[in-house]
Image (cartoon, rainbow, N blue to C red):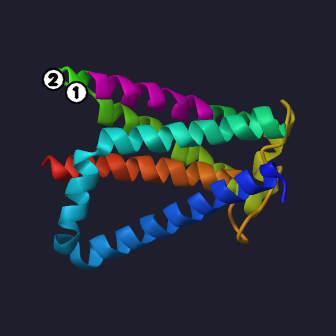
Amino acid sequence: MSSISFITALLSFGTLVADVALALGVIWFIIDRNSLRPLLHWVGNNALELGLIAAALATLGSLFFSNVVGYAPCELCWWQRIFLYPQVVLFAVALVYRIKNKPLGPTFSVSGVLSLLSLGIGLFQYYGATWNPSALAGCAATGVSCAKTYFTEFGFVTMPVMAVTIALLLLAIVASRRYAHS
């Protein structure tokens, strides 16, 4: 297995684990939110670190696919990057502010908005690439087709699935922060 295949499989496995954790978390929250409270508080209290790690890994993954592997990002991928990349800086600056005992400001609100925008684009891209390629026909006119599938791992993990997963993960971190501090 080449190093590119290994890293793609590793990132895909991370996406699968995150998807399972998110799904189980939602089910658990619906069934018995009280027993989930300690985990929500832990995630909420470590939201800056977790958000930074998640955003940084996703950013490095997208840069790996475009700059190392050579997968040209489509227009929708670029928009999702526009909403993801600043979150690395956002969480890093907020960590510095917290260390200096300064207010975090709108860190989590901004992250939530950026993640929601990315989620919407990712869901649209996933829908178009999976069920309705004609919905993405205009995207191909400006460059790489947004319906292009470079890889599929575990039967469903593609780049749009990775983008949707990171957006959901960041939203879950933001929601946990709000839940832990409410």
Q: Secondary structure beneath disc 2?
A: loop
Residue 135 visible within the image: yes
Identify the residue at horizontal 73%, vertical 34% (top origin): 75
Q: Amino acid at mark 1?
A: Arg
The front one of 137 and 99 is 99
Mark 1 is surrounded, within 10 Å at the Cα level, by few (under 14), some (14 to 19) or many (20 or more) other residues, namely few
Q: Is residue 87 above or below residue 159?
A: above
Residue pointed to by mark 1: 98
Q: Secondary structure beneath disc 1?
A: helix
Q: Amino acid at mark 2?
A: Asn
Residue pointed to by mark 2: 101
Residue 124 in the image, given as x and y percentages of width and height: 64, 51
Q: Is residue 1 above or below residue 136?
A: below
Identify the residue at horizontal 25%, vertical 49% (top origin): 44
Spot the residue most to the bottom. Answer: 31
Residue 29 in the image, given as x and y percentages of width and height: 28, 70
Question: Is residue 35 left or right of 6 when viewed as pictured?
Answer: left
Mark 2 is surrounded, within 10 Å at the Cα level, by few (under 14), some (14 to 19) or many (20 or more) other residues, namely few
